[in-house]
Image (spheres, helix red, strand yellow):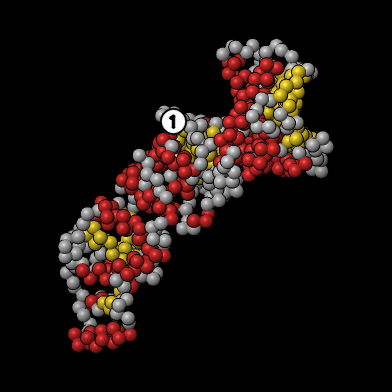
């Protein structure tokens, strides 16, 4: 037996670890299973190159609860450790990592608590929930097994162990304030949250499987059952495969795997796969969107080497794409920094701009390959596209190839098709194209009808951010202005030949106008009598364009919020 003192400057490290990592105690299990996975993958590698002359087999990782003894155990069949390795990797290296961590974050309690949780203290995070930790390990090398024990003081104890099977067993003696981690339901919840797609099978208990009844069994005979391992993870999730290996149905079933409570089918997906200049894989899905922004319950999940990290991808994925769903897996995203640093990080910027480009490319190819289908999806995807156009300049440029402008009659134009369509009929006296649009088909019905009768095209632009989008388009497109169909600009259009004959005499019109202007506040509305010439409405009351836009901008938060934060990819 040997005894030693862990050499750290901080007198007693464990109370500090507990305190600092308070917000995220549960990550200890992710860390220990990550270590077990690493140990197994290392063995796989060493056997494949012939350096470890042992049978790799079909190793799994097992998690076990012993409620009576208040123990939680994590058992793997990986490379294991020799005594020297325990001294080195557990006592020296792991501790120096912990020490460095504490040095760095000593004075920052609170403000970065969420981030610290993701820092991953590795092995020592076990002490967040355990009052004593034991390691029983046997290396794949021909050396005796080792038993390491530490109760949270800087002292540890090493003895020989009897273990004969290769691998490592970590025994946590769960502390009084952490007994929730002895509950089967809690551990299941954590395994599903963090380890659902890890690459080595993870067993947690058994389940009873019902077998088919034998031939000739009677109606009342019970079907036979058998106990099978309860494997909680899928070690080969879709995003780790090549796009060529996957069919549409595979993407859909992976969506269901990711969001078991989500019953809508996704509209389409984007497979991300790049290894230079950064490493990133993933699958993003466009869900059906509604105008309701509160539906954001199922979010994009961030993984590192198949280990769940977070579903808060703010600062990593461009903001307009956070409305999508799916998975991103990248070991190149630094997580031990705050979100604001993250946005300034070079690799992260490149990742954001890569994702933006892939999404734009996908939309373009969908538009080109099947326009009809793209049009049918427009209502569900337009919010993302419109937000993207407003917040990311690069996306705005690319979107010109596929962004659609629907009319009140259900036709869809690209911007250039629209300009071509209206160039003879809808210009004003300065020869500017005037694009008419409605924001509500029912409320503006009579205005729409009247405009259509005059041969105008009327767009239906009904997103919550439409006034921002219009401003953006007016500022980038020369010689184009937008006018709402019930606005006063419609008067300035150079009309086609007017064939309608007025049903009122000039005198009658004058009387009516005087009457109407008396009852309607003239600073807010204008009475339009020309419309009396059409069959649709006797007269039309309009609100000046600028007044209306001002009101709308105020209502939608005047350009702050969503767009204030957009980061520009390079
Ligand atoms: P990291 O995983 O980042 O290296 P940890 O603190 O999690 O840091 O682990 C420290 C080291 O201890 C590992 O690098 C590894 O060498 C060793 N180790 C931890 N758990 C195991 C295990 N289950 N099997 C073999 N070695 C392990
Ligand atoms: Mg680790």
Quadrant in which the N terminus is drawn: top right
- SS category of the residue bearing label 1: loop
Residue 420: x percent and y percent?
Answer: 22, 54
Does the rendering let one see residue 289?
A: yes
Does the rendering let one see residue 539?
A: no
Asked which quadrant contains residue 440, the reply is bottom left
Asked which quadrant contains residue 130, the reply is top right
Q: How many labels does the image show?
A: 1
Residue 352: x percent and y percent?
Answer: 42, 40
Considering depth in this image, is 388 or 59 the residue closer to the camera?
A: 388
Taking 287 as reference, is 123 left or right?
right
Which residue: 65% across, 28% down?
8
Quick check: 205 above or below 384? above
Residue 561: x percent and y percent?
Answer: 43, 55
Considering depth in this image, is 515 or 9 the residue closer to the camera?
A: 9
Asked which quadrant contains residue 484, the reply is bottom left
The residue that mark 1 highlights is 278
Which residue: 19% across, 64% down?
428
Quick check: 227 above or below 410? above
Residue 272: x percent and y percent?
Answer: 45, 35
Considering depth in this image, is 294 or 568 the residue closer to the camera?
A: 568
Which residue: 39% across, 69% down?
442
């Amino acid at each position: 037996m040997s005894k030693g003192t862990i050499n750290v400057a901080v007198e007693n490290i464990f109370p500090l670890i507990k305190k600092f990592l308070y917000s995220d105690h549960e990550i200890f299990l992710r860390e220990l299973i990550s270590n077990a996975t690493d140990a197994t993958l290392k063995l796989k590698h060493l056997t494949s190159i012939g350096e470890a002359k042992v049978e790799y087999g079909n190793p799994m990782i097992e998690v076990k609860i012993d409620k009576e003894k208040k123990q939680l155990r994590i058992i793997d069949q990986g490379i294991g450790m020799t005594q020297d390795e325990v001294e080195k990797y557990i006592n020296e290296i792991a501790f120096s990592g912990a020490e460095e961590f504490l040095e760095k974050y000593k004075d920052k309690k609170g403000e970065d608590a969420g981030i610290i949780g993701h820092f991953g203290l590795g092995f020592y995070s076990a002490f967040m929930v355990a009052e004593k930790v034991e390691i029983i390990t046997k290396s794949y090398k021909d050396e005796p097994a080792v038993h390491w024990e530490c109760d949270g003081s800087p002292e540890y104890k090493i003895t020989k162990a009897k273990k004969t099977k290769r691998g490592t067993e970590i025994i946590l003696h769960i502390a009084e304030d952490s007994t929730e981690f002895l509950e089967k339901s809690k551990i299941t919840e954590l395994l599903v949250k963090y380890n659902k797609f890890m690459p080595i099978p993870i067993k947690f208990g058994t389940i009873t499987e019902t077998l088919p009844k034998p031939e000739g069994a009677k109606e009342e005979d019970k079907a036979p059952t058998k106990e099978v391992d309860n494997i909680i993870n899928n070690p080969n999730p879709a995003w780790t495969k090549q796009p060529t290996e996957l069919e549409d149905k595979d993407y859909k079933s992976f969506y269901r795997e990711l969001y078991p409570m989500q019953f809508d089918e996704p509209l389409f997906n984007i497979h991300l796969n790049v290894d230079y200049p950064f490493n990133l894989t993933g699958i993003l899905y466009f869900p059906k969107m509604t105008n309701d922004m509160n539906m954001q319950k199922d979010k994009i999940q961030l993984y590192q080497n198949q280990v769940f990290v977070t579903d808060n991808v703010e600062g990593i994925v461009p903001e307009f794409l956070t409305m999508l769903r799916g998975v991103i897996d990248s070991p190149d995203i630094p997580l031990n920094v705050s979100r604001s640093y993250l946005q300034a990080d070079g690799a992260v910027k490149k990742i954001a701009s890569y994702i933006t480009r892939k999404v734009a490319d996908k939309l373009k190819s969908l538009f080109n390959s099947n326009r009809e289908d793209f049009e049918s999806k427009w209502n569900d995807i337009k919010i993302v596209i419109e937000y993207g156009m407003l917040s990311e300049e690069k996306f705005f440029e690319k979107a010109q190839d596929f962004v659609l402008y629907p009319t009140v009659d259900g036709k869809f134009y690209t911007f250039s098709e629209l300009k071509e369509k209206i160039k003879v009929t809808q210009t004003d006296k300065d020869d500017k194209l005037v694009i008419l649009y409605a924001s509500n088909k029912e409320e503006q019905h009579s205005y729409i009808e009247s405009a259509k009768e005059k041969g105008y095209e009327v767009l239906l632009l009904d997103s919550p951010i439409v006034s921002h989008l219009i401003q953006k388009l007016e500022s980038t497109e020369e010689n184009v202005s937008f006018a709402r169909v019930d606005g006063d600009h419609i008067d300035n259009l150079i009309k086609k030949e007017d064939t309608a004959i007025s049903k009122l005499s000039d005198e009658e019109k004058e009387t009516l106008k005087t009457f109407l202007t008396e009852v309607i506040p003239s600073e807010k509305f204008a009475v339009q009598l020309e419309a009396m010439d059409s069959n649709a409405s006797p007269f039309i009351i309009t609100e000046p364009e600028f007044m209306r836009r001002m009101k709308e901008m105020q209502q939608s938060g005047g350009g702050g919020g969503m767009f204030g934060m957009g980061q520009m990819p390079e």
